[in-house]
Image: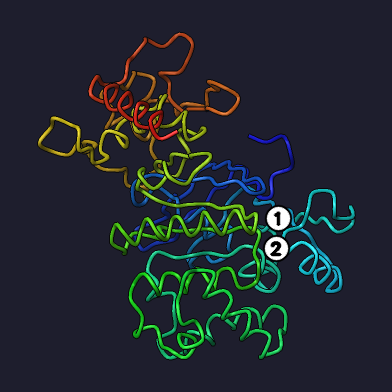
Amino acid sequence: MADTQPILKIRDLDISFKTDGGNVKAVRGVDLDLHKGETIAIVGESGSGKSVTTKAVMGILAGNGTINNGTIEYTYADMSPERITEVQEKYDGVIPEGYLKPEEIKTVDIVQSAPKFIQSQIRGRRIAMVFQDPMTSLDPTMTIGKQVMEAMRFHYNTPKQEAWKKAVRLLELVGITDAEKRMKNYPHQLSGGMRQRVVIAIALSCDPEVLICDEPTTALDVTIQAKILELIKEIQKKKDLSVIYITHDLGVVAKVADYVNVMYAGRIIETGTVNEIFYDPRHPYTWGLLASMPDVDSSDDELYTIPGTPPNMLHEPVGDAFAPRNRFALQIDEKVAPPMFELTPTHKVASWLAAPNAPKVEMPEDLKKRINRMKKEADLNV
């Protein structure tokens, strides 16, 4: 990872939810860094804590959710309107390195910030989110134009005519043809792919520095998925955005991420560069995720599935939460949760198999073959 100050720094984040059955421990001691212009992915099965972590960043946890511990530090540029105009005119909205004065760089802890501050200064303005289902993100009673303009009008009091012009430009940026005409349409008049493009345009309307994409292509067909992922990559380059992808689809991760965080039962259990996670995975859960990816070259008739089910987080697991599903589990896994072992400066894994005195366990042979095929394909595409 870069030596520079992260734009977003999460430390020891712990979140639980009150339910009729008791307290559910959704996130347990998560650490995460996001740097300027970087793309990180958070992967794992449903219920692993991926979305809850990013909703805490956005300040939109459900009413029964509580952050018990931890910090979410966000570092951003706090400039006067005149300086913002100067940057936008001179550098097309991307602030060059060294441009800011020291007093214009602010760091806030989102956990300790007042909801009003998060709403007015952070959410939508500096950190924006693209949700999984565009129909739940869009208001069916409002025109597309009004919805794209809304955040600009709220955060910056942008004059209506100026906001309209910028909204049209944003719709064109995300690949919507006849943007002027579409401004007057309602969500139900657009296809699923176009609706998702509108949601991205809304997220970009206030020129955020961080874009969180929560399963942004799940509801779309494969062709549209590829186009949306390519679109987000293009916009990221143009705007120098930092992007967080939340997904269970490792195929998506391979296409977009610089760094990958594998999450299980509320903890990050492996983290590394995209090459380290795909070509040298060390956690048996990561092995399972990679093995369960569809593979046309596999001789197996059935898709691999990880045995068992994730733990019930009403009762926090003792030891390693993955142990009951792990055929490589050691005796210590039943008693003590593994710490993060550092394999390289960028690659860490929470597994007792990585301990210096642990027995040597190789990944399954089928997965080895698959990884070798993936390496060859990657070399051919270079």
Q: Are marks 1 and 2 in contact (CB under 8 Å)?
A: yes
| Residue 319 in view (yes/no) | no
x 39%, y 25%: residue: 335
State how the image is colored.
Answer: rainbow
* Tag 1: amino acid: Asp
x 47%, y 72%: residue: 199
Residue in front for this viewpoint, 30 or 191: 191
Residue located beneath label 2 in the image: 113
x 84%, y 49%: residue: 98
Distance of mark 1 from mark 2, alpha carbons? 6 Å
Above-or-below relation of 287 to 209:
above
Viewed as shown, does residue 156 lie left or right of 333?
right
Q: Label for residue 188?
A: none
Residue located beneath label 1 in the image: 109
Quadrant in the rendering for residue 192: bottom left
* Tag 2: amino acid: Ser
Quadrant in the rendering for residue 224: bottom left
| Residue 202 point in image, percent of width and height | 54, 74
* Count of numbered labels shown in the rendering: 2
Residue in front for this viewpoint, 249 or 112: 249
Residue in front for this viewpoint, 14 or 46: 46
| Residue 38 in view (yes/no) | yes
| Residue 290 point in image, percent of width and height | 32, 35
x 54%, y 41%: residue: 29
Q: Quadrant of the N terminus?
A: top right
Residue in front for this viewpoint, 352 or 335: 352
Above-or-below relation of 63 to 241:
below
